[in-house]
Amino acid sequence: MFLSFGRGGRLLDELPALGPEPNPLLDVSGLPRFSAIRPAHVVPGILQAAKELQKALEDYEAHLLGTENGSGTWESVEEPLEKLQFPISYSWQIVNHLLMVKNSPELREAHQQVQPLMMNLTSQIAQSLPIYNSFKELSRLPGLVQAQRRILAGFLRAARQRGAELARPQRERFNAVSLRLANLSTAFVHRVLDATKAFSLLLRDRDSVEGLPAFARMLLATNAVAGTDQSPDPDAGPWRATLDAPSYEAVMKHSPNRELRQQLYRARVTRAPGNRGLVDEIRALRQEAAGILGYQSYADLSLVSKMAGRKEAVWTFLNYLHNKSYHVAKAEQESLQKFAQRQGHLAELEHWDVAFWAERQREALFRLKDEEVRPYFPLERVLSGLFKLCTDIFGVTIHPADGAAEVWASSVRFFYVYDEKGTPIASFYLDPYSRPQEKKEGAWMLNFISRSRLLHHTPVAFVVCNQIPPVGSAPSLMSFTEVITLFHEFGHALQHMLSTVPYAEASGINNIEWDVVEAASQFLENWPYDWNTLVTLSGHYQTGERLPASLFREIRRARHYLSGSTLLFQLYLAALDMELHSSTDPWPAVKSRVAEKFTVRKPLPEDCILCTFTHIFGDDSYAAGYYSYMWAELLAQDEFEAFAEVGLQNRERLAKVGRRYRDTVLSLGGSISPQEVFRKFRGRDPSPDALLRTYGLLEAPDRYP
């Protein structure tokens, strides 16, 4: 058995020997040597790792073929595969991570060269009959623990979905489709990043930034002098507005210049027009792959591995929430229109008006301004409060360890996590700031290294956000939304780091049904709305004074502001994703059909939200699975109510509930089904009531001071 580097490429066995210098990308003895890794290391490093893995796979398959039927054990069948896959997985994860946070033409080219090899390698393992049959035999043996059975079932299901049971002609076509899809998804993400970087508006007239808060003017002034030796002047300019989220949102929320807002809005919703063709091809290839595997649609294929299980269950869920939110969202938009008219805006609100007037209405209703809140949330204070919450509720302590690990950017931080006995149990990197020239938009957590008793590994996570960096002499001051985002991603990290499952394949978020992986993250989002937590998160960056109780009350009251519209937009994205992967109709027709039901304010004709929908086209994780955010949020809000029921002011009782949450939701990972995990924590099946209360769609008593 051999691997080829692309069609017509050189066999791995014929590759020339590498030079004498060790490749830092291949050093798996500890944490990555980021300061030494260069794009030039990628191709030779991955080729060498692949060559070593190929030889190990040949020996492993020979061992399996020489094992008598029924005599295989977990130690002789499963564990060797975990050992031999780890080195190349470690190196490849670094490459993909750097592609998202340190993107460059050189790194893109290197990634493009070796991606076919990695796809071939993945297919080889998944489609290996000696491995597949040995895992199947092992799964029938008595004496396995539940986690082991779940791991084997997950491996066999994934292997079938990657073509293990296909005949050779079908398998060859399936592999070609899979490789093409991987290349298209990578190109899709790159085009979004390039389009975001390519557009900007240089503003020289003071009137063009009138109305912007001081932090926003400084941000735009800093953008204008980036890459020069000039100092930003927030009062005299110039200023540069970009499509990067912090800059874009500041203008859309605060600039009274309607023409500027329209220009930015149209530029953002029409970004990456070249991705239109990629959307068509990705959909067609996913449908073809599903057909080869015997499924009616890609959505049917995707849902096999999810808690929902069937399209009918997803649509029942989405329609239920639609019926709860649509009329509320419609009333919210009508109220916003009337508010704008009372303020002198007599025209119909357009898309580029909504954020601006929503911010004005929010300020009027709740006496709450973004620039008044930000100074109370410097990043360091927020981190201190977040870590204290983890100690109070989950019994772990977190300490900075900057300098203990190499980082990929100077602003990246490193931390250790300790249990109650002071034993280090995990570590994580935090990359908090936006770097639009090299870093992908959004926020995410990467489970870089999973807990493994076999490999003696403790978890390592990468937590990545895109908040406003320090501007001028001020530290990074966070909006309340950015605080929530940080908590969200850290919820993912906690589930990864606090898992006690000793098998890497089911530790943390591994082997969890994908429509449940957002539960721990959305659970943690609730805590900044708790006063006892909030006082530890806030501290004015100049005076240290905590956020006034009056402002906190307004934040609490504003939580439900436009919540019907917020929920409906998420339902629109989820329904759009599900229909795109169920129907073969042209995507403009699908988009129009879904928008008719799931939006109050219809998209512009030129709106191409799909061209930047990286969740479903830049990767396949959320393809036919974007509904997962709401499905998981139903679980998350129900789980949080277990804490509210004992009283959020009673920290002693909260700690007991927190211990139970840690021992179930955060600990058990993919070792048992999510239904069982939920029942172990709550003692019953989930209810939608808590989710509806979160969005203000079901009356609930206010349990907060």
Image (cartoon, rainbow, N blue to C red):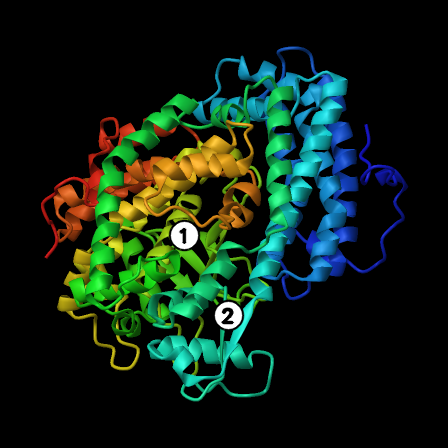
Q: Is residue 24 left or right of residue 346?
A: right
Whether residue 309 is visible to the viewer of this picture, yes or no, is: no
- Residue drawn at x 39%, y 54% is 418
Q: First in sequence: mark 1 or mark 2?
A: 2
Q: Secondary structure at mark 2?
A: loop
- Residue drawn at x 42%, y 66% is 261
- Pinpoint residue 115: horizontal percent, then vertical percent: 71, 44
Labelled disc at residue 489: 1
Question: Please, is residue 465 above or below residue 177 in the view?
Answer: below
Q: Which residue in the protein does label 2 denote?
A: 411
Question: Please, is residue 460 above or below residue 550 in the view?
Answer: above
Whether residue 133 is visible to the viewer of this picture, yes or no, is: yes
Q: Secondary structure at mark 1?
A: helix
Q: Is residue 627 left or right of residue 641?
A: right
Could you tell me the amino acid type at mark 2?
A: Ser
List the single residue furthest toward the front.
346
Q: Quadrant of the C terminus?
A: bottom left
- Pinpoint residue 141: horizontal percent, then vertical percent: 53, 13
- Pinpoint residue 364: horizontal percent, then vertical percent: 18, 66
Question: Please, is residue 463 above or below residue 469 in the view?
Answer: above
- Pinpoint residue 435: horizontal percent, then vertical percent: 53, 67
